[in-house]
Amino acid sequence: MTLPGAHREAIWTRLLRERACAYPLPPHGHHPNFIGAAQAARSLLSHPEVAGHRTLIVGGDRVLYPLRKLALEAGLTLYVPHQTREGWYWRLTDPAGAQLRAMPRVGEPRLHPEGAGAVVLACVAVDRAGGRLGKGFGWGARGLGLGLPEYTLAHPLMLADALPCPPDSRVRLIGLPGRVLGVSAQAGQQTLD
């Protein structure tokens, strides 16, 4: 079995070599801001399971900026982890709040993500059974334990048939540029929407 750190390094290097990511570069140490993230965000937000939610928890990673912007423009309420107060969130309803630097100006600090129906986490790698591998530290590093469905966005180069290491968490939907990969209750069965 491969160590998680070695698999992350391989994915970061592949994305960089294939010129499949944008700032910050190199992608090493980050959830990659992959080319096509806006299309993946549109795909995920239009999926019937996600479209039914009015409130989401969304990570503060750069790759999730298009998703935050689109969701806020569509009238959703978002909770984004506070950058300096562990366990706190920014409650956002203003599309200007999609940018991290604007959150203190337009967001409301909250201890609990009230009404949240799901979580969107960034990833470094994900497999077809829903195993998600994050950057190895930070807010969603070892799963959130909130009891909410989790979703992610990924570039096709980040998608594997099976992770060669234990996942950090499990996601139900994977937003890819132009499509969504849905993971059924039985690991290993997926559907394309």
Image (tube, rainbow, N blue to C red):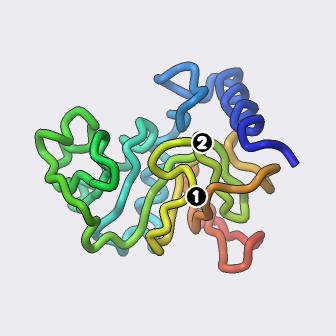
Residue situated in front as seen by the camera: 113 or 94 = 113
User: Of all residues shown, which one is farthest toward the left?
Assistant: 105
The answer to whether residue 30 is above or below residue 51 is: above
Q: Is residue 9 left or right of residue 118?
A: right
Give percent across and percent down for residue 6.
Answer: 77, 35
| Residue at numbered disc 1 | 174
Give percent across and percent down for residue 127.
Answer: 72, 56
Residue displayed at 41% across by 36% down? 62
Classify residue 76 by image quadrant. Answer: bottom left
Residue displayed at 58% across by 50% down? 176
User: Of all residues shown, which one is farthest toward the right?
Assistant: 1
The answer to whether residue 124 is above or below residue 147 is: above
Residue 57 visible to an observer of this rendering:
yes
Q: Is residue 147 left or right of residue 26?
A: left
Identify the element where label 1 is drawn: strand
| Residue at numbered disc 2 | 136
Residue situated in front as seen by the camera: 153 or 58 = 58
Tell me the crowding category of disc 2: few under 14, some 14 to 19, or many 20 or more residues within 10 angstroms, Cα based.
Answer: some
Identify the element where label 2 is drawn: loop
Residue displayed at 41% across by 68% down? 118
Give percent across and percent down for residue 191.
Answer: 67, 70
